[in-house]
Image: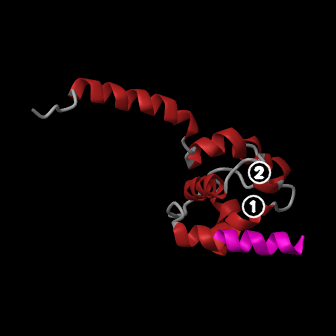
Amino acid sequence: MILLPNVKNMKYLLLLSLCFLSPFAMANGEETYKAVCSNCHASGLNKAPMLGDKKQWGKLIKEGQAHITSDGYHGVGAMPPKGGKPDLTVTEFASAVVYMANQAGANWKEPDEAMLKDINKRIAKKSSKS
């Protein structure tokens, strides 16, 4: 006799595991923007390009996704490294940049493995110069 798992119990287990894992899930770009980036980018504090401002973001968008992501992650102008959140990962930061750029008219995608490798390479290069 073969015992098959009870579907009702499996659904319960799945729901329970999602509840425990969700706090550890990585934030998406909009969530990261709201939690970290909006402190400056919502109001333009210290000349931060404001969310949705096509003119302010236009030049940055032209510089390219890897370039502005690595610059921002390393810290640029009045912006501290990682937007002032020391435990922010490159992936989380990059997703927030995608979210902000897209609000200003870019059509960027979440960075894939190759893009993240390029961003990390640029960050390492900037860090070695500091």
Which of these two is toward me, 21 or 56?
21
| Residue 5 locus on image (x, y percent) | 22, 31
Query: What amino acid does circle 1 point to?
Result: Gly
Image coordinates for residue 121, horizontal then vertical, percent: 69, 74
Residue at 38% across, 28% down = 15
Residue 14 lies within the magenta run: no
| Figure check: 93 above or below 71 | above
- Region rendered in magenta: 119-130
Q: Is the magenta stretch mostly helix, strand or loop?
A: helix
Q: Name the residue under label 2.
A: 83
State which tag comes first along the sequence, 2 or 1. Answer: 1
Residue in front for this viewpoint, 34 or 13: 13
Question: Residue drawn at (65%, 40%), measured in percent from left and top?
Answer: 34
Image quadrant for the C terminus?
Answer: bottom right
Q: Nearer the viewer, residue 35 or 18?
A: 18
Q: Which amino acid does label 2 sit on?
A: Gly
Q: Residues within 10 Å of mark 2 (few under 14, many from 20)?
A: many
Q: Which residue is at the far right?
A: 130
Does residue 28 appear in this view? Answer: yes
Relative height, residue 77 to residue 122 (above, below): above
Above or below, 59 relative to 12:
below
Q: In which quarter of the image is the N terminus?
A: top left
Asked whether the residues under the numbered discs 2 and 1 touch, taking CB atoms below 8 Å apart as contact, a structural biologist would say yes
Farthest left residue in view: 1
How many badges with numbers are in the image?
2
Q: Which colour scheme is used?
A: secondary structure
Within-10-Å neighbours for mark 1: few <14, some 14–19, many 20+: some
Pick the front one: 42 or 75: 75
Residue underneath mark 1:
72
